[in-house]
Image (cartoon, helix red, strand yellow):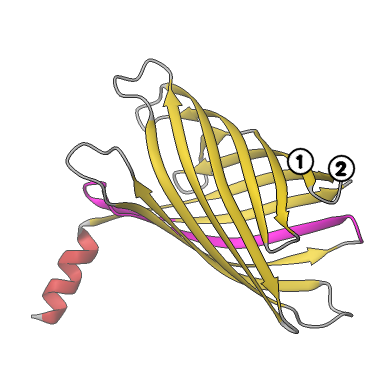
């Protein structure tokens, strides 16, 4: 009976895989104020199809050293739907982030309100509350690699029929410092889509290049 239930559950889930490419440039202007620009390209449908192009501009202000920061982000999303037509979206985020570093462990938390506007959509905006926790292991001063695990939960705020958890991201990866200003991040993301029918489970490989000016 358990085996039958398990296979029925698996058969009710759709699977997909893809890639995420990103470039991030960060600049700290003062001790409190900084900014970043990011470019993203996502590929899905088993690494065969363009999914989105997504530039991001972000500003952050330090409220209490590195322990608490206020963040504002703007996204532009050029997406290709499953049926093949273009979708244009604008996204705004406002949130708080913070973290603390121990001898060999770094903990960071991020909570943000998100509002997404879709061109020619019947319902606007699409509002969500996103919460992320990340744990990074500091191997030592002589090691350039910093492995990490993370999870992010997406909760709907204005969904018809009632609000719920829409999706969850689970990530594992590592960041490699090339020098004091440049690094490369490699990660694996499992995306669990909870409100689709059937439920979806997506696997993405991510490669990102980061520069601090």
| Residue with the mark numbered 1 | 35
Give residue 95's position: percent from left, percent from top: 55, 47
Q: Residue at x 44, y 44 (%)?
A: 45
Helix, strand or loop at disc 1?
strand
Give the number of marks.
2
Residue at the left extreme, as displayed: 1
Assess whether residue 182 is covered by the magenta stretch: yes
Which residue: 29% across, 19% down? 122
Relative to the observer, which residue lies in front, 33 or 203?
A: 33
Q: Position of residue 85 (x, y in %)?
A: 41, 21
The verdict on residue 34 being magenta is no
Which span is picked out in magenta?
A: 180-202
45 and 63: which is toward the camera: 63
Give the left or right position of residue 26, taking residue 187 as reference: right
Mark 1 in CB contact with mark 2 (< 8 angstroms)? yes
Residue drawn at (51%, 60%) of the image: 132
Relative placement, left or right, of 9 versus 142 is left
């Amino acid at each position: 009976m358990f085996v039958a239930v398990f296979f029925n559950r698996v058969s009710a889930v759709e699977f997909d895989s893809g890639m995420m490419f990103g470039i991030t440039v960060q600049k700290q202007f003062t001790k409190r104020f900084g900014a970043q620009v990011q470019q993203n390209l996502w590929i899905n449908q088993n690494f065969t199809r363009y999914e989105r192009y997504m530039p991001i501009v972000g500003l952050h202000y330090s409220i209490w050293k590195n322990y608490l920061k206020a963040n504002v982000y703007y996204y532009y999303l050029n997406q290709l739907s499953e049926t093949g037509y273009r979708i244009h979206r604008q996204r705004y985020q406002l949130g708080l982030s913070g973290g603390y570093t121990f001898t060999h462990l770094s903990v960071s938390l991020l909570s943000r309100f998100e509002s997404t506007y879709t061109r020619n959509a019947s319902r606007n905006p699409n509002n969500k509350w996103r919460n992320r926790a990340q744990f990074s292991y500091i191997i030592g001063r002589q090691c350039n690699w910093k492995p990490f695990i993370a999870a992010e939960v997406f909760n709907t705020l204005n969904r018809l029929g009632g609000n719920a958890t829409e999706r969850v991201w689970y990530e594992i990866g590592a960041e490699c410092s090339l020098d004091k200003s440049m690094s490369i991040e490699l990660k694996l993301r499992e995306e669990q889509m909870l409100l689709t029918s059937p439920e979806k489970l997506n696997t993405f490989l991510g490669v990102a290049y980061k520069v601090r000016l």
